[in-house]
Amino acid sequence: MAKGPVPLIAGNWKMNGLRKGAEAEIRKLARLALKPKKLHCELVICPPATLLLAMQGWLRTARADRRIALGGQDCHAAPSGAHTGDISAQMLKDAGASHVILGHSERRQDHGETDATVAAKVAAAHAAKLTAIVCVGETLAEREDGQAEAVVARQIAASLPEGSRAGNTVIAYEPVWAIGTGRTPAPVDVARMHDRIRAILSERFRDGELFRILYGGSVKPGNAPDLLRIANVDGALVGGASLVAADFWGIARVRA
Ligand code: PEP
C-alpha cells in the first residue's frame, strides 16, 4: 500500500469476555505487541465496558499501554443523565478508553440506530475527546440490488457531524453480510468501495485524504495480507479473530 495514514487495527470483542480469560489473552497480546522495536500501526482493543478498567491495569503492568489502546463499543449521545443502562462517552474516557466504535451494524439492527442517532453519538465522542470509529456498510440485499455504494455514501454523509476530522474520526467499511460469516467481498469490490469512501471524505473534509478507512468483516490472519494491501485500506476492524491474541496479532503483524 502507498504511504498514507498510520494503519489502525482495532479489535471488537462485542459481548464476549470475563475477567479471568480476558486477562490471559490481553497479557499474551501485550507480549506479542511489545516484541517489535517500533510498531508501524496503532492497535486498539474494544472490550465490553465492564472490562475497560481492568484491561487498562493489565496493559499498564505489562508496560504495553502505549502500544495497545482501548475503546468502547457504543456510547450515549448525552454526557450524563436519566438513561438507565447506557454509558456516556465521558465515562468511557474515564475508564481508560481513547476510542469508541459507533454505528456498528449490530447496533443499527438490534437497537434501531439511525444515521442521525449515530451522528449525535459521534459528536458526543468528539466532545469527550474520543476517536470515533464509525461503521458503515450495506446488507446483502442492498448489494444484490446494486445499492451498496449509495447506501454507504448516505451513511457517511448523515453519520458524520460537523467537527469530524481525520484526527478524531475513523471510518470502518463493514459489509453487513461479511460480518461473522467467513465471507469477504472480492478485493476489487473492497478497493472500489474504499476509493469511493475516500472520494466522499475528500469532497467534504479538507483533510479527507488523511482519514483512516478500515475494512471489517471476517478478517482473519489468512486473508489479512490480501485485504490490507489494497489501496485506501488503512487497517481493519476485527471481530471474532480479535478474541484470540495470536489471531489478532497475526492480522496486526501484516502492518506492524
Ligand atoms: C465486527 O463485528 O466488526 C466484525 C468485523 O466481526 P468479524 O470480524 O467477526 O466478522
Image (cartoon, helix red, strand yellow):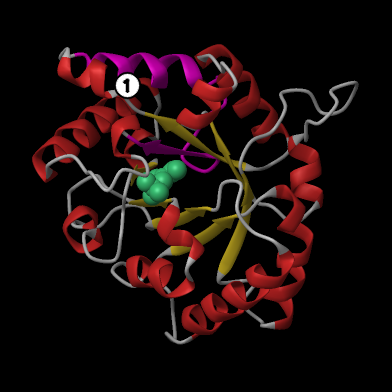
Q: Which residue is mark 1?
A: 152
Q: Secondary structure at mark 1?
A: helix
Residue depicted at x 81% and y 31%: 85
Q: Is residue 92 magenta?
A: no
- The x and y percentages for residue 35 are 46, 87
Q: State the image coordinates of residue 169 (x, y, percent, origin top left).
A: 51, 37
Answer left or right for 51 relative to 229.
right
Residue 165 visible at all: yes
Seen at 44% across and 33% down, the residue is 135
Q: How many marks?
A: 1
Q: In the rendered image, which quarter is residue 83 located in?
A: top right
Q: Nearer the viewer, residue 195 or 190?
A: 190
For the N terminus, which image quadrant?
A: bottom left
Visible residue check, residue 40? no
> Which residue is at a point 37% across and 44% down the rendered structure image?
180
x and y percentages locating residue 198 in the rendered image = 27, 33
Q: Which residue occupies the foreground of this view, 178 or 96?
A: 178
- In depth, the one of 130 and 135 nearer the eye is 135
246 vs 94: above or below: below
Q: In the image, what residue type sits under mark 1?
A: Val
Specify the quadrant of the image occupied by residue 111: top right
Is 168 colored magenta in this rendering?
A: yes
Q: What percent of the width, then of the height, locates residue 60?
A: 72, 76
Q: Quadrant of the image for the C terminus?
A: bottom left
Q: Which residues are magenta?
A: 147-174
